[in-house]
Amino acid sequence: MFDNLTELLQNSFKVLQGKNKLSESNVKEAIRKVRRALLEADVALEVIKVFLDKVQIKALGLKVGQGLTPSQTFIKLVETELTKIIGGKVESLDLKTQPPAIIMVAGLQGAGKTTSVAKIAFYLKQRENKKVLVVSADVYRPAAIEQLEVLSKQIEVDFFPSTINDKPSDIVANAKRYAQKQFFDVLLVDTAGRLHIDEQMMNEIKILQKKVDPIETLFVIDSMTGQDAVHTAKVFSNALPLTGVILTKTDGDARGGAALSVRHIIGKPIKFLGVGEKIDALELFHPERVVSRLLGMGDVLSLVEEISRKVNHKKVQKSFQKMTKGQFDLSDMRYQLLQTEKMGGIEAMMNKLPGLGKIPQNVKNQIVNGAEIKKMVAIINSMTPKERSYISLIKGSRKARIANGSGTNIQAVNKLIKQFEKMQKQMKKVSGGKMQKMMAKMVD
Ligand code: GDP
């Protein structure tokens, strides 16, 4: 996320390295570099000014913190002020209302509205155990209703049918009545987007919003569109009483401008981040964690939370126990590969670890990417259970059969076998007791 900005910010701090105090001249130089980094990231000028004015005033009177270098003291200040400017604290959804709590989602076409509706529905169902109904009031884009229906089936969330011949306000009124009767906790409403702002659209959405009277009106912005997105958000926010923002596509090569500007410009919190195309690729927006990632300090907390949510601890423990006893086989390797894939691949995990996010893309690709994991799992799937337990059985004709079955080739099978043998060797080197203790801590 925002890798380029991270690199530029880290470079800005270098001017303070090795200095024994924060002086007017070295602080000004660092601030000049931070300004350039933020400009390059397409952060709104007004935001840059407010933020850097504060940093400058505070930095000049700042005593170097105990145990910190001047450069670390400055970074800490940047961290605090950046966190403030993007929101300060976590702002989750407000669902405290007479059920159903209605959440309406608005935004331009392609920003990620429909996907975000499905993601939030899944999030509320999975994490907050809510009974959720979704409905589409997008009567302009013919495929939009069907798209939401398909997604809702995929996540097993109820879908209230509508057609392009219905009036948006009738659709939502009917859905609300149904949700009340069937005791749904939440009703999520997708609305029509346009390619750009036009008056008719603004009027329609204003009327709809008034009629629906949702507790949450969320504006979806595509972080790839930088300041344009912030400008659109401002226009919507002037017309509608927005309660928050969903920032999508932060997994791409967005520069970070929208993420850093929107809160200050429209005065509404970012509530969620879209971090991928998959339905579970939605994160609650934690300002301090995002800033930590942005400054290259990683986001270990999110990673730990994600692991404990997605990983079956008992199974992992069993697999590691086998490892420590030297009984690790290819079925265990497959299980671990699948766990890694579930976490979004090694790359997604590395991005949350301090210092590792900076590794160049080509190196990351070489480590293990999603496609590589899928290939490795396909190879293991094409083996018989016996072969998975006794790798030495895999020779000549068996190798050819496995390569054929998995749609790969002999070289790929050989590579996997080599990787497995390497892992096995490595595990034997680690003394059992030490490994078990480490695992016990991790899955505690
Ligand atoms: P809508 O027109 O606003 O309803 O937009 P859609 O929900 O149809 O999304 C447009 C495209 O953006 C689709 O291809 C989505 O898969 C993609 N998309 C939405 N959110 C994200 C995200 O957080 N990350 C990525 N990589 N793609 C996303």
Image: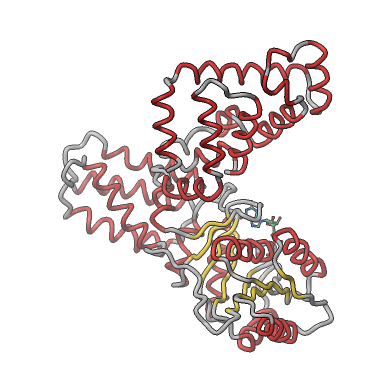
Ligand 1: give its quadrant.
Answer: bottom right
**Which quadrant would the C terminus be assigned to in this image?**
top left
Above or below: residue 20 compared with residue 44: above
The spot of residue 52 in percent (x, y) is 32, 57
Q: Residue at x 61, y 88 (%)?
A: 210
Q: Position of residue 267 (x, y in %)?
A: 44, 72
Q: Quadrant of residue 162?
A: bottom right
Q: How many numbered discs sit on the rendered protein?
A: 0
Foreground of the two, 95 or 35: 95
How far from the left and from the top, in percent, is residue 34?
36, 48
Rendered view: 375 above or below 414: below
Q: What residue do we see at 64% from left, 80% from top?
A: 183
Of residues 120 and 266, the one drawn nearer to the viewer in this rendering? 120
Residue 102 placement, left or right of 157: left
Judge whether 235 appears above or below 118 on screen. below
Q: Is residue 187 above or below residue 346?
A: below
What percent of the width, then of the height, locates residue 122?
Answer: 63, 62
